[in-house]
Image (spheres, rainbow, N blue to C red):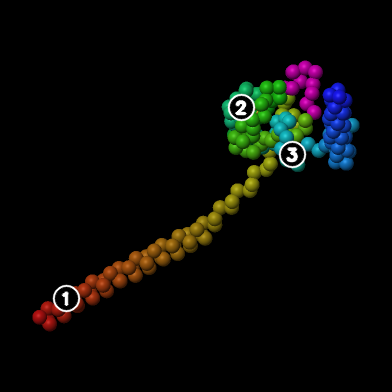
Amino acid sequence: MSSVKEYFSGFGKGLKSLVTGMSVTGKELVTPKVTEQYPENRSTLKIADRFRAELTLKYDAEGRHKCIACGICQMNCPNGTIQLTTKMVDLPDGKKKRKLDKYMYDLGSCTFCMLCVETCPQDALEFSNDFEQAVFTRDKLVKQLNYRPEVADAPAPAPKPAMDPEQLAKIKAEALAKAAKIKAEKEAAAKAAAAGADNASGNDTENK
Ligand code: SF4
Ligand code: SF4
């Protein structure tokens, strides 16, 4: 008798387990898919903008970057991931200027901490979300970030025109005249106040 009871008890548990499993499967059949069919969906794959895949220099529409080769990112990088070399160039006005020669970045040792990006005073760096970075050898992970041909610096803004000397002299004369007028008014007011005080003391003496 007990074996028949055990048989039906086991049968009931098995049936309950089957129904539970089938209900989970049925629910998943009607919920939207969350799995990605990579690489088949490469063209439509959406990677979050904030995903940090690779350090890059920001370039403007003309192909210029804003790095001034100050070395702050290199100093702040905890892993020695950034190696800068600089060069001195002659400017049209005869002065010399230090410029970026090579900006080398080793993706293989980067921990994506963003210290370089956060501390750059020129806002010259950012992380791309280009996640396909697989290579066969580690040396391929070392990249030159200033890879584009160098574009001439943007022309310096035109210097402010010097003020006409006559206009300058006129402004100075007006300012001096204004100051002298204010001084004279103050002196007159002080004299009037002193005279008023003398009169008041004279009246007091007469009344006594
Ligand atoms: S990327 Fe920024 S912090 Fe680094 S050297 Fe260039 S300007 Fe300086
Ligand atoms: S993200 Fe961090 S580890 Fe990577 S280069 Fe910048 S400072 Fe170095």
Q: Which residue is mark 3?
A: 49
Q: Is residue 25 left or right of residue 75?
A: right
Which of the two discs, 2 and 1, labels the residue nearer the N terminus? 2
- Tell me the number on the disc at residue 15: none
Q: Which residues are magenta?
A: 132-142
What's the residue at 12%, 78% (across, down)? 205
Q: Quadrant of ligand 2?
A: top right
Q: Secondary structure at mark 1?
A: helix
Q: In the image, what residue type sits under mark 2?
A: Cys
| Closer to viewer: mark 2 or mark 1 | 2
What's the residue at 77%, 30% (across, down)? 131
- Tell me the number on the disc at residue 77: 2
| Closer to viewer: mark 3 or mark 2 | 3
Q: In the image, what residue type sits under mark 1?
A: Ser
Q: Is residue 32 above or below residue 97?
A: below
Which of the two discs, 3 and 2, labels the residue nearer the N terminus? 3
Which of the two discs, 1 and 3, labels the residue nearer the N terminus? 3
Q: Which residue is mark 1?
A: 201
